[in-house]
Image (cartoon, rainbow, N blue to C red):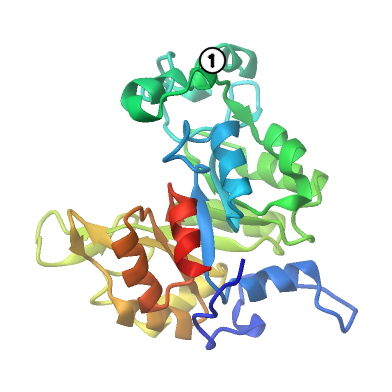
């Protein structure tokens, strides 16, 4: 699938958050991954989750078939220390279970049905094959797609998943996903990303941010965790501080239908060494607008739609 290069200001040297070791004049797989981030990336949000239950093998298979650049998943820990792909902190929305996912063993979670809810929520897309869908371990995902896919993994709610960083890095190393340029790690939690960086400085990181009106002053935008100032107040130094450990910024661009960032924000981030990925964009008009802004990638539930726009 051809990609349009969308920014030229970022070179490998500007991705300061990643230490790349190579003794060869040839481009290493990890260097190639960083270079690819200069071009547009189709990021399949929980797989092709507009077509099949989120984070399911069916959704991942579709995204893979449609040649998405990254399979995106939220990673959590079971009570017995297994890494699983599941978005919510609690089970109710996308399974027939209840309570916190972290309170259950993998065996207990495997007994749940994480597909029937999709048939109920989207009857036009219902498929009997989704009934009884099992929660996936990250190891199962790697065993299926291996080095044939790239993975965009979030350390989800790290305060509820103590030890998730060490467990994730251990598995990535065991499956040789880092030096082969197969993985990005994302988080809203800056400390979680810094833990990942301390464990293995070669892993490319994405700092997630969420911009919304300040509760005390709706005319002023703030970032949810305080990792940056609001878009109207952000400086080159603020972007550079993120670029010390991360190769990119994952951000919303709308809040309640109103834009919270603009093309100037995107350019400024890129000029300070950060790729810009926008979540989660499903309408083709919005996709095209952001492509025209020059963003480096979009999270979408419909990778098929997005791929058609950037072919």
Q: Name the residue at the bottom extreme.
A: 9
Q: In the structure shown, which secondary structural element does the residue marked by tag 1 occupy? A: loop
Image position, residue 32 (x, y; %): 72, 72
In the picture, measured across the screen, residue 122 lies left or right of residue 192, that is: left
Image position, residue 159 (x, y; %): 47, 38
User: In the figure, residue 119 lies in which quadrant?
Assistant: top left
Residue at image location 81% in from the left, 72% down from the top? 28
**Quadrant where the N terminus is found in the figure:** bottom right
Q: Residues within 10 Å of mark 1 (few under 14, many from 20)?
A: some
| Residue 187 seen in the current view | no
Image position, residue 21 (x, y; %): 81, 73
Image position, residue 141 (x, y; %): 68, 37
Residue of label 1: 132
Residue at image location 39% in from the left, 56% down from the top? 279
Is residue 230 depicted above or below 151 in this figure? Answer: below
Q: Between residue 74 and residue 290, name the one nearer to us.
A: 290
């Amino acid at each position: 699938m051809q990609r349009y290069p969308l920014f030229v200001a970022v070179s490998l040297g500007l991705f300061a958050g990643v230490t790349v070791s190579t003794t060869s004049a040839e481009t290493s797989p990890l260097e190639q991954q960083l270079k690819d981030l200069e071009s547009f990336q189709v990021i399949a949000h929980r797989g092709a989750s507009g077509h099949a239950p989120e984070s399911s093998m069916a959704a991942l298979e579709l995204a893979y078939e449609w040649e998405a650049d990254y399979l995106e998943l939220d990673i959590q820990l079971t009570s017995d220390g297994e890494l699983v792909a599941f978005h919510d902190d609690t089970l109710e929305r996308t399974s027939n279970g209840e309570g916190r996912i972290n309170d259950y063993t993998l065996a207990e979670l495997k007994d749940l049905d994480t597909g029937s809810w999709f048939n109920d929520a989207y009857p036009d897309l219902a498929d009997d094959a989704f009934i009884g869908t099992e929660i996936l371990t990250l190891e199962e995902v790697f065993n299926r797609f291996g080095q044939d896919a790239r993975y965009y993994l979030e350390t989800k709610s790290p305060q509820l998943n103590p030890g998730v960083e060490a467990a994730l890095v251990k598995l990535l190393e065991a499956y040789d996903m880092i030096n082969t340029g197969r993985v990005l790690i994302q988080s809203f939690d800056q400390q979680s990303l810094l833990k990942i960086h301390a464990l293995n400085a070669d892993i490319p990181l994405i700092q997630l941010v969420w911009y919304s009106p300040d509760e005390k002053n709706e005319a002023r935008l703030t970032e949810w965790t305080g990792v940056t100032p609001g878009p109207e107040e952000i400086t080159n130094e603020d972007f550079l501080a993120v670029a010390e450990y991360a190769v990119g910024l994952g951000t919303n661009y709308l809040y309640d239908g109103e834009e919270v960032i603009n093309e100037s924000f995107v350019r400024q981030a890129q000029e300070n060494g950060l790729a810009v990925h926008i979540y989660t964009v499903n309408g083709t008009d919005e996709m095209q607008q952001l492509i025209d802004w020059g963003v480096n990638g979009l999270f979408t539930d419909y990778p098929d739609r997005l791929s058609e726009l950037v072919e």
